[in-house]
Image (tube, rainbow, N blue to C red):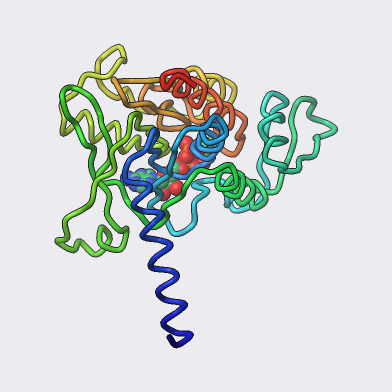
Amino acid sequence: MSSENLISSAIVRKFADKLLDGLKLDVAIVGGGPSALVAARDLAVKGLKVAIFERKLAPGGGTWGGGMLFNEVVVQDAALPVLDDFGIRHESITDAPGYHTLDSVEMASGLIFGALQAGAKIFNSVSVEDIVFKAGKVNGLVINWTPVERLGMHVDPLTVIAECVLDGTGHPSEIIRLATDKAKIKLDTPTGNILGEKPMWVDNGEASTVENTREYFPGLFACGMSANNVMGGYRMGPVFGGMLLSGRKIAGIIAGRCGK
Ligand code: 48F
């Protein structure tokens, strides 16, 4: 076989194995932002079969750009154990006790690396366009290549079956929105619907992100800004402690559900 054939067939075979293995999961996570990456790592560490489906070529969500493209972010004391588990470095801010800065590129790449090394799979450039909804429960995802979605090509998708589906899609809560719009489900919120994100209030938003991280319908969970949008929490900008702690919290809830 020529080198050209060897290289191409190795990639196709290896990817086919990975995708086949990813078609039936304990936990299917939509979106590869910071909260989802922490959840993926923690779930994989607990022995669950977990994969992230991320629309963009590069996972990491809103981490890379820091604040207004100044590539530094801030976390609070409470989130340091999460960063330490990933080996991501941080520096305390001398005139702001309790706060720490870190390089946003190190944070994004460190979270991605940590999730993969723990055993989570990441399928990038894959968009989730629908859910599988059977017998009153969310049972999985409907996926397609992002270029197919972007070009509006009329190409049928594939499906992923999962015990639990985690919406980590950030501000728009895309998967929970799909579930309310198409499956007409009533969420576990005061109105049964998405309440919608409120404007900036850092301390309140950080606390509510973690508080709002939970199951909203049988088999359907939310973390990070998605959870905050569902429950009408405030936004908080480039402080990321709440995102990291949200990922850790939802991993504990889902693992408990799966008996781990
Ligand atoms: O928004 P995002 O970074 O998720 P997060 O964990 O973190 C929020 C913060 O980055 C920031 C903030 C904190 O201070 O306010 O915004 O809540 O990442 C969400 C990811 O989901 C992907 C999207 O490309 C992004 O990388 N995504 C969204 N919808 C889909 C999706 C979809 N339908 N299919 C696949 N990926």
Q: Name the residue at 21% across, 53% down.
A: 157
Residue extending farthest to the front is 1
Q: Is residue 6 above or below residue 227?
A: below
Residue extending farthest to the right is 94
Task: Give the side of residue 161 with respect to residue 26, left or right.
Answer: left
Q: Name the residue at 60% across, 48% down.
A: 108
Q: Position of residue 58 (x, y in %)?
A: 49, 57
Q: Name the residue at 61% across, 35% down.
A: 239
Quarter of image, ligand 1: top left
Q: Position of residue 197 (x, y in %)?
A: 39, 28
Q: Position of residue 242 (x, y in %)?
A: 57, 28
Q: Position of residue 215 (x, y in %)?
A: 37, 20
Quarter assignment of residue 23: top left
Q: Is residue 82 above or below residue 106?
A: above
Q: How many discs mark residues in the rendered view?
A: 0
Query: Quarter of the image containing the N terminus?
Result: bottom left
Quarter assignment of residue 227: top left
Which residue occupies the foreground of this view, 85 or 190? 85
Residue extending farthest to the top is 190
Which residue occupies the foreground of this view, 115 or 110? 115
Q: Name the residue at 50% across, 27% down.
A: 251
Task: Give the side of residue 219 with respect to residue 260, left or right.
Answer: left
Which residue occupies the foreground of this view, 223 or 134? 134
